Image (cartoon, grey):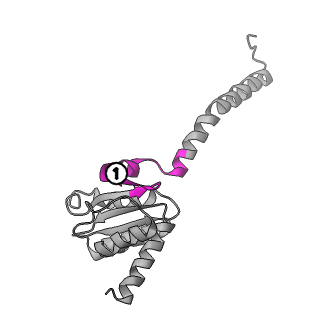
């Protein structure tokens, strides 16, 4: 019979899974306490959460949360979970940033993830981590839209300045 503590843990994990827009599964073996503290701080700043739980409890919580995909292949060994509540890509970006250092590549690795209601392979999580942030994408779009307008304004100002200076403009 499961203890009340484990039941509470499963219920809390299931609630986090339901509330999260995404989550990333990470092999945290070999990470130092200082690195983990920095990781947790960055997660909190981005509206995400990083925690470690038992694989068996997480499997039960997945079922309770209504996730139909099987994570049995990635829920082996040491596993930590990064939940994205505000930005679904933030956990992947933060975890990938730490994992890409040379000495961490082999031990602190992304195992997989969950995004938009389905399981995502580790390679796709890494691809998502390399995408620009939402704010960067919006600024790229705005710059693309404002570019022609900006050129028109510069041309108009230039013509007006030339007319004021008395320079003949070919019409």
Query: Residue 82: percent from the left, percent from the top?
Result: 39, 66
User: Tag count in the figure?
Assistant: 1
Q: Residue furthest front?
A: 1
99 above or below 37? above
Q: Does the magenta stretch include residue 143?
A: no
Q: Quadrant of residue 163?
A: top right
Relative to 156, is 126 on the left or the right? left
Magenta residues?
Answer: 114-137
Relative to 97, is 18 on the left or the right? right
Query: Residue 147: percent from the left, percent from the top?
Result: 61, 33
The one of 24 and 33 positioned closer to us in this rendering: 24
Q: Please name the residue shown 37% across and 88% down the image.
A: 5
Q: Please name the residue shown 37% across and 69% down the image.
A: 39
Tell me the quarter of the image containing the C terminus: top right
Q: Residue furthest top?
A: 170
Say whether residue 48 is visible.
Answer: no
Q: Is residue 115 magenta?
A: yes
103 above or below 132? below
Q: Please name the residue shown 77% across and 23% down the image.
A: 165
Q: Is mark 1 on a helix, strand or loop?
A: helix
Query: Residue 122: percent from the left, percent from the top?
Result: 31, 53
Q: Residue under circle 1?
A: 126
Q: Please name the residue shown 69% across and 25% down the image.
A: 155
Tell me the quarter of the image containing the N terminus: bottom left
């Amino acid at each position: 019979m499961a203890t009340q503590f484990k039941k509470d843990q499963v219920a809390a994990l299931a609630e986090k899974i339901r509330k999260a827009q995404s989550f990333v599964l990470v092999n945290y073996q070999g990470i130092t306490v200082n690195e983990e503290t920095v990781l947790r701080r960055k997660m909190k700043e981005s509206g995400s959460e990083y925690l470690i739980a038992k694989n068996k409890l997480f499997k039960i919580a997945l079922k309770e949360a209504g996730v139909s995909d099987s994570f049995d292949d990635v829920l082996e060994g040491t596993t930590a979970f990064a939940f994205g509540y505000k930005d679904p890509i933030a956990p992947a970006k933060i975890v990938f940033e730490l994992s890409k250092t040379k000495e961490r590549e082999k031990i602190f690795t992304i195992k997989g993830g969950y995004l938009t209601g389905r399981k995502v392979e580790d390679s796709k999580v890494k691809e998502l981590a390399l995408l620009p942030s939402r704010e960067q994408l919006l600024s790229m779009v705005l710059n693309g839209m404002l570019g022609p307008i900006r050129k028109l304004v510069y041309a108009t100002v230039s013509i007006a300045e030339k007319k004021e200076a008395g320079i003949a403009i070919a019409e």
